[in-house]
Amino acid sequence: MANRPLRFGVVAGEASGDLLGAGLIQAIKQQHPDAVFEGIAGPQMMAAGAHSLFPMDRLSVMGIVEVLGRYRELLGMRRQLARHFKQNPPDAFIGIDAPDFNLGLERQLREARIKTVHYVSPSVWAWRQRRVKKIAAATDLMLTLFPFEAAFYQQYQVPVRFVGHPLADTIPLEVDKATARQSLGLPLDAEILALLPGSRANELQYLARPFLETACWLQARRPDLRFVVPLANAERRRQFEEALAALEKEGKGLHGLTLVEGHSREVMAAADAVLLASGTAALEAMLLKRPMVVAYKLAPLTYWLATRLLKVENVSLPNLLAGETLVPELIQHAATPENLGREVLVFFENHHSRESLNQRFSAIHRELRRDASQQAAQAILQMLEGQQAKRQAY
């Protein structure tokens, strides 16, 4: 390792992986400035010094139909990458998330005696747990963002390191609500509920209307309550406005509603409480110390399948991290305006409940705040040093 530059193969499949990869590259380069990274990288990783053999957006595909439509192309990309790395073996290959693509590639490379790392665990602890055997065959080291994931892999003797979550590093332990409100032009003294019905079209399809009806239910009981809705892009805004127009057509008016394109983190920071779709937004709300109610709705057949596959009682990250139900989760038929409204109302009427939740959220935040990029870099470099020591021993 000391005689030549370290070489790494690396593949990220979407923007979140690109951000993780950029932080990891920077952390490794702090110790090995001449380290080389190549594979599939996004703009952040390329800015950090990675060379991309394919455009990352060709890998950023979601949904069964979309994947099937690009299956041959994706398979061809994976074959070419496997051939390239076998012919030019890196010191280690790092697959960042994108498990459907990366784990198959990792297995091929590991069989060729190339060390492999997978950064960001698939949700194997929640469903299809038998996949852990395939993961064990594919990777020499799993890097997890959450401690409960590491505990799961330890049960199966898979080498694992909990590195913490980058969001916990970037979001401060205390967030200034007044500053967030000023940046969004919101009144400093109002009661505000943030509504986050999701960033995908199908999420808004199922949650935009229930969330709006929940807002109406709440406003009937707290007339001065205001609502702020961040929408991921112009298309999601149009979709939400259609749901709002349909509600108004039925005579269900709603005042004090502000729509914002983007800025979801600032909106949650500005709010007193949050009603949101289950997902990464729940983790952000927790790190921002905002009380929340989590909801989710799926197509009936998808929900039926999910209930038979899931192996965990809770689905939201705050509850999974706490190991108990800290925040209400209202899924499918339970996600009615009345049920959602009653749970939200608790946070506006019971300040003790909000303070207790804040303390629990702060404790979890500190547990996740570990400088994830440095931890991940250290774990990978230690793995390589251990490998070199074994070679020297022989």
Image (cartoon, rainbow, N blue to C red):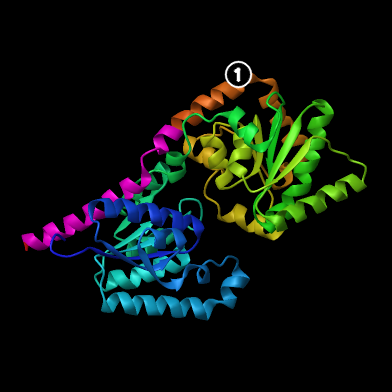
Q: Nearer the viewer, residue 221 or 264?
A: 264
* Residue 110 higher or lower than 359, as above or below: below
Is residue 32 located in the magenta-colored stretch of the structure?
no
Q: What is the secondary structure assignment of the residue under circle 1?
A: helix
Return the x and y of residue 17 as percentages of the image width and height.
45, 57
Q: Quadrant of residue 265?
A: top right
Q: Residue at x 63, y 19 (%)?
A: 351
Residue pushed farthest top?
Answer: 352
**Which three-letter amino acid code belongs to the residue tagged 1?**
His
Q: Residue at x 36, y 42 (%)?
A: 371
Q: Quadrant of residue 364?
A: top left
Horizontal placement of 27 versus 351: left or right?
left
Q: Quadrant of residue 170?
A: top left
Where is the C terminus found, in terms of image quarters? bottom left
Q: Nearer the viewer, residue 40 or 220?
A: 40
Is residue 377 located in the magenta-colored stretch of the structure?
yes
Residue carrying label 1: 352
Horizontal placement of 264 versus 72: left or right?
right
